[in-house]
Image: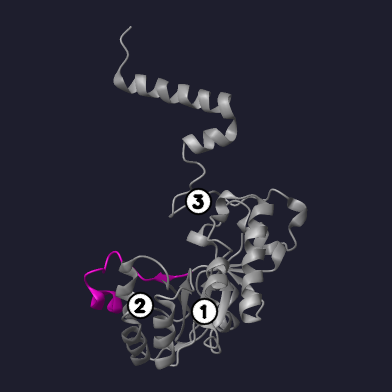
Amino acid sequence: MVLSRRQILAGTGLAVAGMAVGAGGQPLARYVFGLNQPPLAGGYASAADVLTDAESPSTTITYHVRTDEPVVAFTFDDGPAPDWTPMVLDALDAWQVPATFFMVGRNLSQHAAVVRGRLDRHEVGNHTWSHADLATLDLNQATAQIDRGAAAIRTATGRNPTLLRPPYGHLGGSTILAADKLGYRLVLWSQQMREAQYEKNPQGQVRDIVDTVRPGSIVLAHDVGDQRRLVALRHLGEMFAGLRARGFRFVTVSELLALGADGSTVRP
């Protein structure tokens, strides 16, 4: 019998799977097939591995808020860091715009001086301790990441965060259960900076935000990352000016949530 190339490859795949399970069990199989690395655009379905820890009958996940008021919340993830966070704060100060910073606890612990005395009008949310992908963690691990991030925020700012943005926007693993257990509201976004698309076209990035924001939008940006993100951060003032010309005012995420209706949320 002559085997086709496809059959040979299929057989090899099955053999690798068998070796993975036989040699190291499930963890090795997960590694071999990349199951420990959910894609940025996806992730595992939400799990409840310790059902007795479910405090609420449902947990809200907010992408935007349904409102007729022309309001928008800008959010900045992954900081703080000395390179770009001051630039963002300067732009927010110049335009008197409040924002919500979803901070990584480890970064805040290392760079607390960057934001000291500069957060009066701004909100601080939890983005975990080390930007770990919660979709790959069990409940104890996810809880530890969130708790340690919150502790860093309390130490540096004296505030107790109530909003959680999971890294990469992944809601899998025990993310939802951990958020519920710890009393967080999960916040994602409805618009975002598209720096890769507009890397050579900053005015295109400005127009994309100014033209696509709708009442109740939550806008995702980052104050840490690669150089492409500067195409957005260097032009925040133009975005603010354009949105104000459209009649928008700026609020923190919590202020936005206070305006929302139940129709703006997803309830797992």
Secondary structure beneath label 2: helix
Callout 1: few (<14), some (14-19), or many (20+) C-alpha neighbours within 10 Å? Answer: many
* Extreme-right residue of the structure: 52
| Circle on res. 242 | none
Write the start and end of the magenta stretch as one range.
189-208
**Residue at mark 3 to residue at mark 1: CA–CA distance:** 25 Å
| Circle on res. 233 | 2
Circle nearer the viewer, 2 or 1: 2
Whichever of labels 2 and 1 marks the residue nearer the N terminus, that label is 1
Callout 3: few (<14), some (14-19), or many (20+) C-alpha neighbours within 10 Å? Answer: many
Tell me the kind of residue under disc 3: Gly
Q: Which residue is mark 3?
A: 43
Circle nearer the viewer, 3 or 2: 2
Tell me the kind of residue under disc 2: Leu
Taking the image as shown, residue 98 lies to the left or right of residue 137, namely: left
Secondary structure beneath label 1: strand
Q: Position of residue 208 (x, y in %)?
A: 30, 75
Task: Specify the quadrant that holds the N terminus.
Answer: top left
Q: Position of residue 143 (x, y in %)?
A: 67, 59
